[in-house]
Image (cartoon, rainbow, N blue to C red):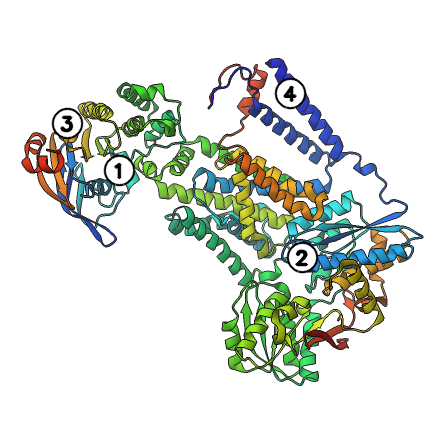
């Protein structure tokens, strides 16, 4: 990207390195059993939120389709997988995959008609979809309505959450590096030109919608099996907004941005507990400050890459490096 | 350049080590319970839609702690420290708070959560961590069956529904009733079902059952359907903000029936919101501020003095839950969560603000239900009944 | 190569094309000229299947393409350079060109074509790592054309390439259009700048209010009094 002068510190490299070290440290603590349940719990939510944010980024950031219904997909995955676990007693991984597929299927069914809409209209349509899902869940007998679903086996382990989060990130990175990723980006940039270049715009939009929905569904399944209890309230409009905030704060289109923002935004409310009732005020104030100083999000559209770390050790930043 | 890189690398590593020691070590070496302090946790929604219940419950709990500490504390002079956390009524937050209270604050027992959803999640964790929790206000029928470490001081949904049904049928002599409930709310559904069951069992007839969604502003469609069936009573198990709207709109359309509900009605906001339309309605609740008993009046006086506000029912229940815990810790003889829980289960005839209670096999309190009405713009006590 | 027969297109209630008929033979440059709103761009968009037609036939290389999807035409060698350029602004010039070859898999041929594009448009080579959104209008037009060439067109549809450009640049662009044509690419050119268009075209059609009102070889059209009066500023 931009020309790097020789004196400039390779921040991306160090940030990546710090992230890698943190990751190793966290896992050493986890495996050695030294991590308190409090942090383990937060880590679990961080992981689930990463899956949600990264998958929403595929739809909103990378393909440029403004969706406000991610909590709806999460809800479908949560309920389908929970009901499978309760009634059919299938193993967790099968339940999760089924939850994801159900969400993806719904993504296709809803995506085909609504993805013709643009911008605000699509946002409203997806918002409506999320609310419809919630209301349906409230009124079905099998979901136990507002009472919520109890007795879901609590089989989600922190390692599984980590694993799925990694799979999601790796899927997204590989996608971005492929021709398909280019096609998705070109749709965000200019739909007409993309179509004129022979890119099947409808197919890719629905693909992004379905893939995003799949991972959101899996995240919902993990959530259900982590909590042991889910209610429609868990998947309301505010939930969609929370995920959206993570994506926007991290930078629309940046996967690493989503990951960083998710970690910050999930840990922040807990770190601010000391401030009692001013906690959420501070949280919101911090969001405003960040958006004022970095309207393009923490990372913009940039990505952190392992490549940058290699540069540090090979005499870092001496050469203008393009990747 | 290379040197600079190494320096930064060192700083990053140093930071990591600092973080490691700051967060993950040392905590375990702290003595679990200070000689002179016994820590109790509080979980409830202090912000968000259910904040009025959470804040009231917290205020009640703080009052109880003040009272107990002022009269010499527990366990030969130890003071109770109440650690309050806001869960926003959210289950995810509740998980984090439970972990924090248990691990970091090392509390002996927990008052809360306040609403049913979070209590369900907290109940699972209470069982896993052998940490007694006493919910002041979670009325969902089954939550105390999740684990033997869960108790509550309020009655459960299907406990008050039949009380109102019996009152309507036998005391008021009503034969027909309609139900208007909030289908997005588990509490409302529970009450509606248990009321209907008892009312029909006693020979009454439910002539209409209409649903609305929390946050609806216009109830005319449902009320018109109900009016068409001409019931003598309309049972509305919902929260006060919806109730006030319903009462106003029913009055405006001339629906002439006795409106009744559950403890969700018990808020000054109901009278403020509905005005005249609230006159003559009946509801079951945990206590009445019009109750002249010494316990109630003393509590109200202290509450008004300290907070300069009127408590709703969550206030005295928060007080009673804390009182119950303190009593159990005292009887356990030590600040040990498992022993405290044994003492909670064994509670017999403890007198709190909301009445005298013992527990059934699922740690639900067996106590009186208060029936209140609105008369001349004020709440009035009608009766206290044991089902 | 391309035959358009009796094409009718509606925008909602508005009858935009009322039976347009024309043909393009292999190797030609054919231009559609006409005033604003006459239906030129509509015709082009309908051929590239971005707009649906109500009636009429579009036959490309002997095949009726009425039912073909827009993106599938690219593989058949029918490429459009849309009006208003439509480059991908947040991608580099190079990335834009790479996307032009989106439907192609032969890396070697793509590399050769990239070199050809850079020979035609040396400026794009200079700016290959620059973001397309930061290019000037003329450069963006060049990029849009270069990107289309990366798809190996047999028939290239050019929509208003002179739009908003300085006269000098227009001359340059049209020069390049002629050069592209010499490499064997058939060109259908839609232009408001009738003068320029007729100067490089073999044949032309004049479109007015959704109908072809005049047709002929470029020279005779340029000499036609009505055409002169209406479109050539004479």
Residue holding disc 2: B51
| Cα–Cα gap, marks 1 and 4 | 54 Å
Secondary structure at badge 1 equals helix
Tell me if I can see residue C221 in this picture.
yes
**Tags 3 and 1 in contact by the CB under 8 Å rule?**
no
Nearer to us of marks 3 and 1 is 3
| Cα–Cα gap, marks 2 and 4 | 47 Å
Q: Earlier in the sequence, mark 2 or mark 4?
A: 4
How far from the left and from the top, in percent, is residue A251? 51, 36
Labels 3 and 1 positioned on one and the same chain: yes
| Cα–Cα gap, marks 2 and 1 | 60 Å
Secondary structure at badge 4 equals helix
Residue holding disc 3: C200
Q: What's the mark number on residue C73? A: 1
B201 in relation to C63, above or below: below
Nearer to us of marks 1 and 4 is 4
Q: Rate crowding at label 4 as few (under 14), some (14 to 19) or many (20 or more) other CA atoms within 10 Å.
A: some
Q: What's the mark number on residue A75? A: none
**Tags 2 and 3 in contact by the CB under 8 Å rule?**
no
B247 in relation to C90, above or below: below
């Amino acid at each position: 990207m931009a020309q790097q002068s020789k004196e400039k510190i390779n921040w991306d490299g160090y940030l990546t390195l710090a992230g890698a070290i943190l990751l190793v440290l966290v896992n050493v603590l986890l495996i050695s059993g030294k991590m308190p349940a409090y942090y383990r719990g937060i880590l679990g939510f961080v992981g689930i939120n990463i899956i949600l944010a990264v998958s929403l980024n595929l739809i909103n950031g990378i393909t440029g389709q403004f969706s406000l219904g991610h909590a709806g997909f999460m809800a479908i995955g949560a309920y389908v997988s929970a009901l499978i676990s309760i009634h059919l007693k299938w193993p967790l991984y099968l339940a999760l995959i089924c939850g994801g597929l159900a969400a993806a299927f719904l993504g296709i069914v809803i995506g085909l008609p609504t993805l013709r809409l643009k911008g605000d209209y699509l946002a409203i349509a997806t918002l409506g979809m999320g609310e419809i899902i919630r209301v349906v869940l409230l009124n079905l007998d099998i979901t136990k309505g507002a009472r919520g679903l109890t007795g879901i086996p609590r089989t989600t382990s922190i390692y599984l959450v980590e694993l799925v989060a990694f799979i999601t990130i790796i899927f997204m990175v590989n996608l971005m590096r492929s021709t398909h990723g280019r096609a998705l980006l070109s749709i965000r940039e200019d739909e007409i030109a993309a179509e004129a270049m022979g890119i099947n715009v409808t197919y890719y939009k629905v693909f992004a919608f379905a893939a995003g929905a799949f991972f959101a569904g899996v995240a919902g399944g993990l959530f259900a099996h982590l909590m042991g209890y889910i209610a429609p309230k868990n998947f309301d409009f505010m939930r969609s907004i929370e995920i959206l905030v993570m994506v926007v704060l991290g930078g629309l289109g940046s996967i690493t941005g989503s990951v960083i923002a998710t970690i910050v935004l999930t840990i922040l409310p807990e770190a601010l507990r000391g401030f009692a009732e001013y906690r959420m005020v501070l949280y919101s104030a911090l969001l405003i400050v960040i958006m004022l100083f970095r309207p393009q999000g923490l990372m913009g559209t940039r990505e952190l890459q392992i490549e940058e770390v290699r540069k540090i050790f090979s005499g870092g930043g001496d050469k203008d490096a393009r990747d | 350049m290379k040197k600079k890189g190494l320096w930064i690398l060192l700083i990053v590593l140093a930071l990591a080590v600092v973080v490691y020691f700051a967060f993950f070590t040392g905590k375990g070496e702290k003595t679990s319970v200070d000689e002179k302090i016994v820590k109790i946790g509080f979980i409830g929604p202090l912000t968000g839609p259910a904040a009025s219940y959470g804040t009231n419950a917290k205020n009640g709990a703080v009052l109880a702690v003040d009272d107990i500490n002022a009269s010499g504390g527990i366990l030969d002079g130890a003071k109770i420290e109440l650690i309050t956390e806001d869960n926003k009524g959210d289950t995810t937050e509740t998980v984090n708070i439970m972990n924090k209270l248990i691990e970091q604050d090392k509390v002996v027992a927990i008052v809360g959560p306040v609403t049913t959803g979070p209590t369900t999640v907290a109940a699972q964790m209470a069982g896993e961590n052998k940490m007694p929790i006493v919910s002041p206000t979670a009325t969902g029928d089954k939550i105390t069956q999740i684990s033997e470490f869960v108790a509550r001081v309020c009655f459960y949904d299907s406990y008050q529904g039949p009380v109102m049904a019996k009152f309507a049928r036998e005391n008021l002599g009503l034969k027909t009733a309609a139900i208007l409930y909030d289908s997005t709310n588990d509490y409302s559904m529970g009450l509606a079902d248990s009321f209907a069951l008892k009312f029909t069992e006693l020979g009454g007839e439910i002539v209409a059952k209409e649903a609305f969604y929390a946050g609806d502003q216009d109830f005319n469609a449902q009320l018109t359907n109900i009016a068409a069936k001409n019931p003598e009573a309309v049972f509305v198990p919902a929260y006060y903000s919806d109730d006030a709207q319903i009462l106003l709109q029913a009055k405006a359309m001339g629906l002439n029936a006795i409106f009744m509900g559950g403890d969700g009605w018990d808020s000054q906001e109901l009278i403020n919101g509905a005005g005249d339309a609230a006159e003559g309605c009946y509801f079951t609740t945990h206590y009445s501020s019009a109750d002249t008993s010494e316990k109630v009046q003393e509590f109200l006086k202290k509450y008004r003095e300290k907070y300069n506000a009127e408590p709703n029912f969550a206030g005295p229940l928060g007080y009673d839950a804390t009182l119950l815990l303190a009593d159990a810790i005292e009887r356990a003889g030590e600040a040990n969560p498992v022993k405290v829980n044994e003492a909670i289960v064994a509670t017999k005839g403890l007198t709190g603000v909301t009445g005298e209670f013992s527990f059934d096999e699922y740690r639900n309190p067996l106590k009186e239900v208060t029936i209140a009405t609105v008369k001349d713009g004020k709440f009035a006590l009608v009766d206290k009944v044991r089902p | 190569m391309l035959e358009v027969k009796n094409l009718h297109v509606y925008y909602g209630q508005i009858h935009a094309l009322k039976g347009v008929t024309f043909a393009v033979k292999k190797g030609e440059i054919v231009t559609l000229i006409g005033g604003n709103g006459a239906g030129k761009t509509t015709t082009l968009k309908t051929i590239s299947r971005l707009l649906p037609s109500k009636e009429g036939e579009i036959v490309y290389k002997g095949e009726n393409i009425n039912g073909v999807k827009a993106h599938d035409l690219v593989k058949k060698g029918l490429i459009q350079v849309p009006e208003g350029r439509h480059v991908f602004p947040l991608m580099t010039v190079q990335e834009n060109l790479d996307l032009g070859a989106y439907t192609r898999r032969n890396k070697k041929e793509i590399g050769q074509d990239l070199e050809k594009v850079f020979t035609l448009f040396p400026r794009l080579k200079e700016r290959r790592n620059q973001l397309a959104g930061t290019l000037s209008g003329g450069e963006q037009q060049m990029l849009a054309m270069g990107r289309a060439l990366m798809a190996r067109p047999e028939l290239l549809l050019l929509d208003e390439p002179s739009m908003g450009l300085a006269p000098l640049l227009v001359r340059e662009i049209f020069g390049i259009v002629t050069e592209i044509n010499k490499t064997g690419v058939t060109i259908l050119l839609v232009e408001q700048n009738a003068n320029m268009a007729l100067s490089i075209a073999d044949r032309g059609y004049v479109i007015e209010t959704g109908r072809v009102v005049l047709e002929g070889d470029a020279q005779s059209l340029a000499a036609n009094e009505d055409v002169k009066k209406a479109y050539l500023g004479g």
